[in-house]
Amino acid sequence: MLEPDARADGPLRLALIGAPNCGKTSLFNALTGANQRVGNYSGVTVERKIGRTVTPAGEALMVIDLPGTYSLRARSPDEVVTRDVVLGRRKDVGQIDLLVVVADATHLRPGLRLAQELRACGIPILVVLNMIDIARHRGITIDAERLEHELGLPVVTSTAVRRGGMETLWARIDAMLGQGLPERGAMTWQEPTAAQLRTALRQADGLIARTVHKPVAPRSLTEKIDTVLLNPFFGPVFLLVLMFAMFQAVFAGAAPLMDAITVFVDWVSATVSAALPEGLLRGLIVDGAIAGVGSVIIFLPQILILFAFILILEDLGYMARAAFLMDRIMGHAGLHGRAFIPLLSSFACAVPGIMSARVIDDRRDRLTTILIAPLMTCSARIPVYTLLIGAFVPARSIGPGIGLQGLVMFGLFAAGVISALLVAFVSRLLLRRNEIAAPLMLDLPDYKIPQLRGVVLGLWQRARAFLRRAGTIIFYASVVVWVLSTFPFPPEGASEPAINYSFAAMIGHLLEPILSPIGFTWQICVALVPGMAAREVAVAGLSTVYAVSGGEAALGSTLAAHWPLATGVSLLVWYIFAPQCLSTLAVIKRETGTARWMWVTVVYMFGLAYVFSFIAYHLVRALGG
């Protein structure tokens, strides 16, 4: 934590501030290199980046990368932090000595307007026109000297991502420090009204008209593509087809790799079994650890295919278009269009999805998004879905390139989305019936070719996180389930399987009366308990309880032999709704600042899971399943 009074003997504090996507973080990296650390501001879960550096003239600096904002009119947790740091209200940061306003040279309007507002804070300001290379490539010329004169603030240009213009920036910073930073002026900032913001925007437009020349260009490729992909009819159809193709690929594309992993896990299991004498140690390692962890890691290819789609679409620039297309649908459900990005992130994991809801200005919209984010079908559900679909849904084609199993998977993901929208709609009817949803204001970036290195790095990071999870949470849970399934030993002359006398059976039979109306066996009850740590642990739990090795196919065959179809369908429906992830519940408590909304989530999601599983179980039974 930074001490507020450390400035007298420590480095000067330089804060980077700018609108989102202006290249501020790239400039921070260029200024500080590897000498930086990431944490949260005290008392709030908003990321802060702090780096230390030394200017060419030898002046020590502490560089603070502030969350992106368009104005000090704070409407979200991120913007509140930025405002409080600039105004010196945060004791864990202290007073800022120099503000560096980062403006996108290709889109100066928000940066110049923000710089004008910040002048009222009384802090010395330096304006950096970032991404100047892209502006020049587009034929945009900026008269930086005239802009500096008319703005009344020092102005430099840079290309932070390629370290271009850094010498000029360093020289300007050293010149300002060498002359001695001007004394802080009187702080006259007051929250601007909507009329004042419009006036400031007109002033920024006037500055741009006098100092920036943009060539008259033909329609860009991005504009041509958007005429098709943002078409009111074709746009949503294309998005739906894209999502459908993604889930078909999750099954069809992953099968060969999953088979290879299954062969490898079987080989490891057989090798260890041959090397160890029969007994508890071999049972612990083979039936507990290897069977449990192996039953989960075989789903890694499917998870990576899902992430590959998401990463490529993000790099391509399509995600903002998807949010734009979904805005009208989400508006009818009472959600802000910006909620689409957190909800889409929740397909990977609800934890970062919930945290990214900070971009939503309105507090109640943000709360609604947080509460429904766990309904999105996260990657941790994929092992459970794949196992049950493989066990109870035939692997047959129902059309050219359309598999029945992929169609069911798509239906499960769609059910999560629809249920989230319905919950949001009910929430709006109860809490905000007469309010009109705020319109979505969103910058649509140009399309660009995804960088292979970035996609591969993103996949590697997610694979490493999944394998680390498999090596820790899933490993420990598998061992615990094996211990519970093994001890105590059956009595002398016992005629039933040994597991029926174990602690696991005791726990399962204790919970069975509660869950038997929805078709759950005591073995499922046992698997659900460690599955609270992470949803995919339930697969490892079932593998251990049924003492099955040999991967997904063997476990699926076992379940199909022991369960009726109604039970399999009921468990699939349960996983659409049930909040079986302690990490998600913990982050809801942290982001909302109270345990109340965490318990609201637990009650409503378990309630929905039980009700719809009950309906599904008895409906399938009535139809002969």
Image: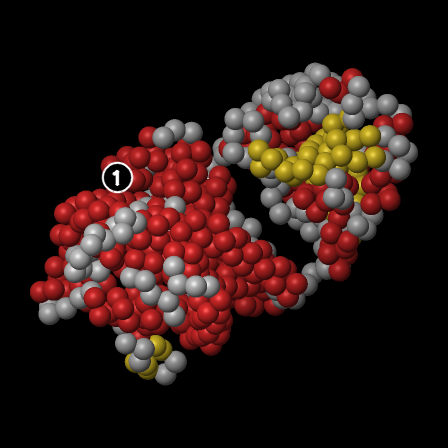
**Would you say 26 lies left or right of 428 here?**
right
Residue 609, x across and y down, in percent: 24, 50
Q: Is residue 569 visible?
A: no
Q: Residue furthest left?
A: 622
Query: Which residue occupies the foreground of this view, 575 or 174?
Result: 575
Which residue is labeled 1 in the image?
Answer: 603
Query: Which residue occupies the foreground of this view, 349 or 333?
Result: 349
Secondary structure beneath dot 1 equals: helix
Q: How many marks?
A: 1
User: Measured along the vertical axis of the image, is residue 128 above or below residue 320?
Assistant: above
Residue 261, x across and y down, in percent: 48, 70
**Would you say 487 lies left or right of 36 here?**
left
Mark 1 packing: few (<14 Cα in 10 Å), some, or many (20+)? some
Q: Is residue 278 visible?
A: yes
Quadrant including the N terminus: top right
Residue 299, x across and y down, in percent: 44, 64
Q: Residue furthest bottom?
A: 400
What residue do we see at 66% from left, 46% from top?
22
What residue do we see at 19% from left, 44% from top?
510
The amino acid type found where label 1 is placed reads Val
What residue do we see at 72% from left, 59% from top?
138
Query: Which residue occupies the foreground of this view, 65 or 217?
Result: 65
User: Measured along the vertical axis of the image, is residue 260 above or below residue 220?
Assistant: below
Q: Residue furthest front?
A: 492
Quadrant including the C terminus: bottom left
What residue do we see at 35% from left, 36% from top?
598
User: Measured along the vertical axis of the image, is residue 577 above or below residue 237?
Assistant: above
Residue 260, x across and y down, in percent: 48, 74
